[in-house]
Structures are given as C-alpha cells and as structure tokens.
C-alpha cells in the first residue's frame, strides 16, 4: 500500500488520536493485519458470552477497539479492553513469525544453548517475536488512554496490560525431537493457542469472573479495592469501577443491545434460560425446520458418509420491552 493509500485508510479509522494515526501511516501492513485479526478476537469474545445477556455485540457493531466501546466502566468494558489488547498482540506475533511484516521477524534473542528441568537444547526454528508485538501494541493502543489521563483511562491502561500479559503467559516451548530416546535438542517458542478452548480467551474469561471493583487512590495514580477487606488487585487481574447494567433494555451508553429477539433455552436454569435471558418479559415460540447430518459412518479408507436428517424443532425467542 502506498503512502497516499495508507494515509486515506488511517484518516478513515474513527476514534484515533494523532499518535495512533502517525503509527498507522508508518505501518500500513500492521494495520491490515490488525483488521484481519479483529474478527478473531471479536469472535472469541462472542463465543465466551454467547449464552449471556451481554454477548459482546457492542464490539461487532462498533468495529472500533481503539475507542471507548463501552462508556460505562463495568467489568464487561474491562474484558473488552483486555481481550482486544491480547488479540492485537497475538495477531502481530503471528504476522511477524510468518514474514508478513517488514518491521519484524522471528525473535532475534532466541539463539544459542538453553537448559531447563527437561534438559539442554539449542534454539532453532522461528520463535515468536512476542516482545515486538507487545511493544507496538502498547505504543498504539495505550496512546489514546495516555492522552486522556483520567480515571477511566487509568482503568483501560491496566486492563490493556493484563491482556498483553495473558499472551506471554501462554507462550509454549515446542521441540524437534531426534533419536530413539526422543530427546529434545532443538526448540522454538510459540505464542500458544488462540482462540481455541483452554487458551487466552478462557483465561481472560476467568479473570472477568474474578475482576476487582476498585476506586482511585487519593493520589489519582492507582487503585484500591472498593471493599477494603479484599486483597489489592495484581497486574494480571481485571479492574472496573461501576456495577454492570442488567443488559435487558437497549442502551448504547451502557453497551447494552437488549435481549429482545434473543434465542433462549426453555429447559435451562442457567444464564441462557428464558427466565433469565428474557428478563421476565416472556418469550415467543416458533416451529422451524432444520437439516442436520446424521447416521454418519466411517468407510475405510478414508471417508465419512452421512445422511441429511430433517426435523421440526421449537425455537424460543425473548419478547421485547412493551
């Protein structure tokens, strides 16, 4: 992409501050990689909350992970900032290792001999350059918050950092093993699973569940727990200021799309139940036809043949506010 093309692209991204537009113009290929990766971490957010009143729909609607997606300083906002930051780091880490970017490549620091509890090995292959990805992510995403310099910005900075740290937490060593003993003598470091089950998405979801409600300290430089008897949150924890809304009614300011029209489970007792999902407004039931693969059989070698089975099912959807 030429200089003029990158300038037009960067000027059309809403919500960027001058520092972000400058980085955007300087690194158009990085911005293209971010655009592709954006769909992945929005999808992971929606996967984590698919059966809840808030299902990460604000992210999909706004397509702007660099502005204030959720105006209320809730635990949902904390999760959005953390998973967006983690997603950006992972996307850039992968793009660097695959040679898609001019500004980075494999981790240059992974050279020579290394040893741990499993033995001694030599660095080889292409270790993921997560440090470059973290450095760029911090410069780009944090630029907006550093300009704002208010309580919400401090909260966002904390959760951005927690997201970045989550990627490093899931770095994994992969070895090339040789010989009868299967000993590992050549290894490289990778950024681990994303967004598969057991990866950063699940880890950050647990951090969402245990997020700490905080208040600013008297100096305006950090946080203390809203309930003094609880321990101070660590750099790995998510933090938030305000209680979450119930997300029953559409309200853009709180990041709520409402639950009218959402599919619910009539037999469930969890968050996806019609009683909980529909906020006591009741639900409509419709009969729909669907086709699924059934009676699948494995044929040697190597194919699976299935029948198309048609069935009638009841679908329950929440009524909207009257």
Image: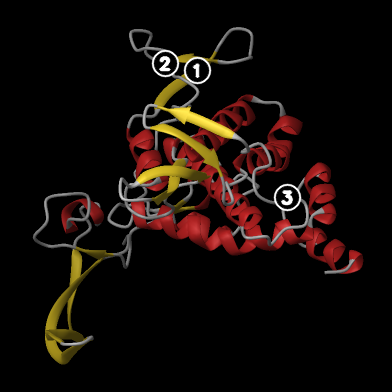
Q: Percent from the top left, x then y, of residue 297?
A: 12, 85
The circle on residue 90 is: none
Which residue lies at the image location 34% right of the left edge and 12% below the top edge?
A: 230
Which residue lies at the image location 84% right of the left edge and 53% below the top edge?
A: 26
> Could you tell whether 209 is left or right of 172 in the image?
left
Which residue lies at the image location 30% right of the left edge and 65% below the top edge?
A: 262
The answer to whether one can see residue 289 in this image is no
Q: Foreground mark, 2 or 3?
A: 3
The residue tagged 2 is 226
Q: Badge 3: few (under 14), some or many (20 or more) residues near its Cα, within 10 Å? A: some
Tag 1 near tag 2, CB within 8 Å: yes
- Within the image, what quadrant is residue 107 found in? top right
* Relative depth, front residue between 199 and 260: 199
The residue tagged 3 is 104
Q: Earlier in the sequence, mark 1 or mark 2?
A: 1
How far apart, in angstroms, are the residues tagged by discs 1 and 2?
6 Å
Q: Percent from the top left, x then y, of residue 220?
A: 63, 14
Q: Badge 1: few (under 14), some or many (20 or more) residues near its Cα, within 10 Å? A: some
Q: Percent from the top left, x then y, of residue 237?
A: 44, 27
Q: Which of marks 3 and 1 is nearer the N terminus?
A: 3
How many numbered circles are shown?
3
The residue tagged 1 is 215
């Amino acid at each position: 992409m030429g200089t003029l093309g990158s300038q037009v692209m960067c000027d059309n991204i809403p919500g960027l501050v001058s520092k972000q537009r400058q980085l955007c113009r300087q690194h158009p290929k990085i911005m293209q990689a971010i655009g592709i990766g954006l769909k992945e971490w929005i999808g992971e957010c929606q996967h984590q909350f698919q059966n809840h009143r808030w299902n990460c729909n604000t992210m999909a609607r706004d397509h702007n992970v660099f502005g204030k997606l959720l105006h209320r300083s809730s635990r949902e906002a904390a999760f959005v900032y953390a998973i967006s930051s983690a997603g950006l780091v992972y996307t850039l880490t992968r793009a660097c290792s695959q040679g898609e970017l001019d500004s980075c490549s494999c981790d240059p620091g992974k050279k020579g001999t290394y040893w741990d509890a499993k033995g001694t090995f030599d660095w080889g292959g292409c270790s993921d350059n997560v440090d470059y990805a973290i450095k760029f992510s911090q410069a780009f995403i944090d630029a907006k918050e550093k300009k704002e310099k208010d309580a919400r910005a401090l909260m966002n900075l904390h959760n951005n950092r927690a997201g970045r740290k989550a990627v490093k937490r899931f770095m994994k060593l992969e070895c090339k093993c040789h010989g009868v003993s299967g000993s590992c003598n050549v290894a490289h470091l990778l950024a681990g699973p994303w967004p598969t089950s057991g990866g950063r998405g699940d880890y950050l979801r647990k951090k969402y569940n245990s997020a700490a409600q905080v208040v600013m300290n008297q100096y305006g430089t950090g946080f203390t727990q809203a309930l003094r008897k609880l321990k101070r949150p660590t750099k790995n924890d998510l933090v938030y200021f305000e209680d979450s809304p119930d997300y029953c009614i559409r309200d853009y300011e709180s990041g709520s799309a409402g639950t009218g029209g959402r599919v619910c489970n009539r037999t469930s007792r969890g968050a996806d139940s019609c009683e909980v999902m529909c906020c006591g407004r009741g639900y409509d039931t419709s009969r729909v036809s669907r086709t699924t693969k059934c009676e699948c059989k494995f044929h040697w070698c190597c194919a699976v043949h299935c029948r198309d089975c048609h069935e009638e099912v009841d679908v329950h959807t929440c009524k909207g506010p009257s």
